[in-house]
Image (cartoon, rainbow, N blue to C red):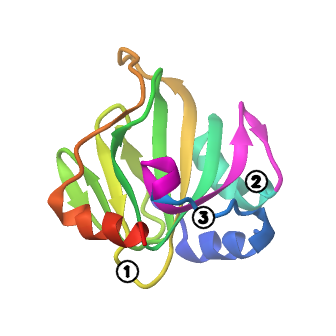
Amino acid sequence: MRLDPGLLLTALAGVPPTAWSQPSSYTETGVHHGYRRVVLVSACRRQEHAELFDFVWDVLDPVRDAWLSWIDPGGFIIPHRDPGPWLQRWQVPIAAAGQWRSPDDTFTPRPGVAFPVEHWLPHAVVNRGDTPRIHIVADRDVRLNVPPQPFETCPVPADMADLIERSSR
């Protein structure tokens, strides 16, 4: 699934800086650092700024929940499994930076090239770049037949230790 990177950037430009949450701190969350978000769809109801991304919702319909996900340069999300029950999840990169990591793959997303997320399996994000990583994360209103499990963090790989150390200063 591909979306126009230019349209995505134009839509993103319509979201004011004040709409974003404050950046997270690993020392407070124990899971992520430099993470911010803007909720766009919640329980199938569009929130403020969602209309900017109508062309995305047209492709992903039906969307139950969606948000903009921002990870600062030097930010990360440690390996974890999201809690179930699970819905079909997609990520749409707008400003691609850093790496996506899952048990089967590590890759650098490309702007506009959406990818499915198996969020019932361990996954992580690392942004060692100089620019923020900004994606739309969308849960389609399509339930998956995967037995529900609770949220769980996984061992942090050695190549993320320096990021965790820096986030603690």
Sort mark 2 into few (<14), some (14-19) or many (20+) by Cα contacts within 10 Å.
many
Mark 2 or mark 3: name the one nearer the start of the chain: 3
Secondary element at image label 1: loop
Mark 2 or mark 1: name the one nearer the start of the chain: 2
Is residue 1 at all visible to an observer of this figure?
no
Residue 113 percent location from the top left of the image: 42, 62
Residue 34 percent location from the top left of the image: 51, 66
Residue 118 percent location from the top left of the image: 34, 38
Task: Say above or below: 120 vs 144.
Answer: below
Which residue appears farthest toward the bottom when viewing the image? Answer: 130
Left or right, 133 with respect to 67, comes to left
Determine which quarter of the picture holds residue 117.
top left
- The CA span between labels 2 and 1 is 28 Å
Determine which quarter of the picture holds residue 150.
top left
Mark 3 or mark 1: name the one nearer the start of the chain: 3
Secondary element at image label 2: helix
Q: Which residue is mark 2?
A: 50
Q: Which residue is mark 3?
A: 23
Sort mark 3 into few (<14), some (14-19) or many (20+) by Cα contacts within 10 Å.
some
Sort mark 1 into few (<14), some (14-19) or many (20+) by Cα contacts within 10 Å.
some
Q: Which residue is mark 1?
A: 129
| Residue 143 within the magenta-colored segment of the rendering | no
Q: Nearer the viewer, mark 2 or mark 1?
A: 1
Q: Nearer the viewer, mark 2 or mark 3?
A: 3
- Which stretch is magenta? 27-48
- The CA span between labels 2 and 3 is 21 Å
Residue under the point 42% across and 85% down: 130
| Residue 41 within the magenta-colored segment of the rendering | yes
Left or right, 64 with respect to 48, comes to left
Front one among 18 and 13: 18
Residue type at numbered disc 2: Ala
Is residue 107 at all visible to an observer of this figure?
yes
